[in-house]
Amino acid sequence: MNDEMIQSFVRIVGKENIKYSKAQLLAYSYDATANFQSKPDLVISPKNTEEIVEIVKLCSKEHIPIISRGSGTNLAAGTVPTQGGVVLLFNRMNEMIELDEENLTITVQPGMITLDLSTYVEANGLFYPPDPSSMKISTIGGNVSENSGGLRGLKYGVTKDYVRALTVVLPNGSVLKTGGKLAKDVAGYDLTSLLVGSEGTLGIITEITLKLIPLPVYKKTGIAYFNSLEDAARTVSSIIANKIIPVTLEFMDRGTIGAVEDFMNIGLPRDAEAMLLMEQDGDVELVQKDIQKMIEIAVAEGATSTSIAASPEEADVLKTGRRVALSALARKRPTTILEDATVPRSEIAKMVRAIQEIAIKHDVQISTFGHAGDGNLHPTCLTDVRNKEEMIRVEHALAEIFEVAIQLGGTITGEHGVGEMKAPYLEWKLGESGINLMKQIKQSIDPLNIMNPGKIFAKETKTRLVIHNG
């Protein structure tokens, strides 16, 4: 990017809000995805919608790619500027705009940290349920772009279930406002839902209005250990069949349990084949009844040991153990590849067993944890990107995991998004007609393909695998 072009951006946001030194560009050349890196031409920190409009108009005129970036926690190379261009940072757009307690909504800028929002509304007796594991550093804008989930997704749903309204700068520089604080709105196409989870490929989100709910008055946490994956999976199905919808129903396999224990030293049994973390919230009587019933179900289905947290502090330790699973596993090898294949909850045992067999078949190290209650599993491959031969085996193993998930009625991603990493597999899930329809939508909104180009749509689809199960 030449000096004249840089000066054009300087006139919009000020010199102090532009990064273009070699070291600065290198810092924004990657996200949390392994083996993807590419430097942008410029990094810009706008302060409002108006500045973003001017940036987009200039980029549109010059056909410059724009990549919206939150905290860079993306796990599918969704914020890697693989085609160069301008990276937009939202560190100057991180404020709460309005808390509306009459309509139970909060309007924020996209750069607000998820945990900060959650803490703020809870201090006011309200609750924002979506809680991705990266919530301490991930941004609300990133959550909306990826339609992020979290540990509380089983009972409360994911980000899309709480987005009421958006302000978006479209690729031609026009401003679109969708939705509102109202509870019902079926006027025209649901543009809000189209933009949630679009991974920055259709526009730049500059304001977000979220639904809030009353803060639960009480919660209780339990834990159960099993000697078989099947026993843990049956427990999940049985809990749901008993008409209990817990806040949290999380799973960790033996490898993950061991890694977390190495990391935290909290007394987790290393010989357990699987662990389920259960939590319920609501009225005191209902919570106590449900948590006790879930423990009873676990015992009936073969749990070798169970316990109920005696205090909020003890519960926080158990939940932290699950939240740090990725960090604990990442300490084992130089490179960590976290996936999120999702299947119907009735197929969890088959999926976890298949992951273990695939790991052995391709001689790679994979541990699995995830949201058992909604079938969203995170097979985590521990490897070394410098070992080219091993990385080929890793790629084959992950492709096979995606194929098995689809065969079991699932999908290639439940909450991490497609990005560039999973784009070659998207047609496996959607089919040719689905991909073509999405391309037509993208072309109609972004004909110059400047919004996060290279993401979601692959240059070439991977060859479909033939796997015979059972």
Image (cartoon, grey):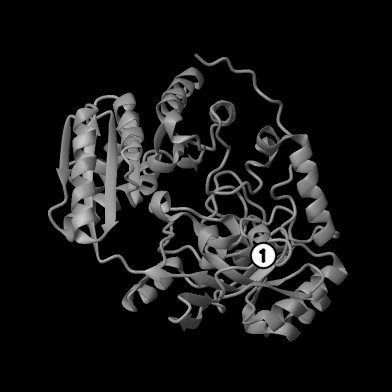
Asked if residue 354 is positioned above or below residue 265 in the image, the reply reads above
Label 1, residues with CA under 10 Å away: few <14, some 14-19, many ≥20: few
Q: Secondary structure at mark 1?
A: loop
Q: Residue at x 68, y 42 (%)?
A: 423
User: In the visual, does 442 lie left or right of 352?
Assistant: right
Provide the residue designation for mark 1: 186
| Residue under the image location 38 percent in, 54 percent down | 152
**Residue 153 image offset from top left, x and y in percent:** 43, 52
Q: Residue at x 85, y 59 (%)?
A: 447
Amino acid type, residue under disc 1 in the picture: Val
Q: Is residue 348 visible?
A: yes
Position of residue 210 measured from the top left corner of the image (x, y, whole percent): 51, 70
The answer to whether 381 appears left or right of 50 in the picture is left
Observer-nearest residue: 305 or 156? 156
Side of 40 relative to 113 (left or right)? right
- In the image, residue 148 sits, relative to residue 215, either above or below, namely above
Residue in the foreground of this view, choosing between 211 and 8: 211
